[in-house]
Amino acid sequence: MYVVLLIVLIIWIGIFVYLKSMDSKIKKLEQD
């Protein structure tokens, strides 16, 4: 059970980091 929660947590963190990096790239493009 804990293994499933751990996998879900890792996936959510990965998605969050991915979205944050995409957001920063978009902001950099808008500044240029």
Image (tube, rainbow, N blue to C red):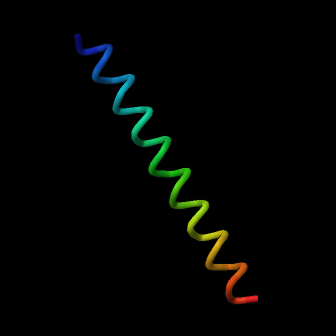
* Residue 23 coordinates in the image, percent (x, y): 56, 67
* Residue 19 coordinates in the image, percent (x, y): 52, 56
Residue plotted at (34% across, 33% down): 9
Residue plotted at (42% across, 32% down): 10
26 horizontally vs 11: left or right: right
* Residue 30 coordinates in the image, percent (x, y): 68, 84
Q: Which residue lies furthest to the top in this view?
A: 1
Name the one closer to the observer, 3 or 23: 23
16 is higher (above) or lower (below) than 3? below
1 is higher (above) or lower (below) than 28? above
- In which quadrant of the rendered image does the N terminus lie? top left
Residue plotted at (59% across, 60% down): 21
Q: Which residue lies furthest to the left in this view?
A: 1
Q: Residue furthest right?
A: 32
Corner quadrant of residue 8:
top left
12 horizontally vs 32: left or right: left
Q: How many labels does the image show?
A: 0
9 horizontally vs 28: left or right: left
6 is higher (above) or lower (below) than 9? above
Corner quadrant of residue 24:
bottom right
26 is higher (above) or lower (below) than 20? below
- In which quadrant of the rendered image does the C terminus lie? bottom right
Corner quadrant of residue 27:
bottom right
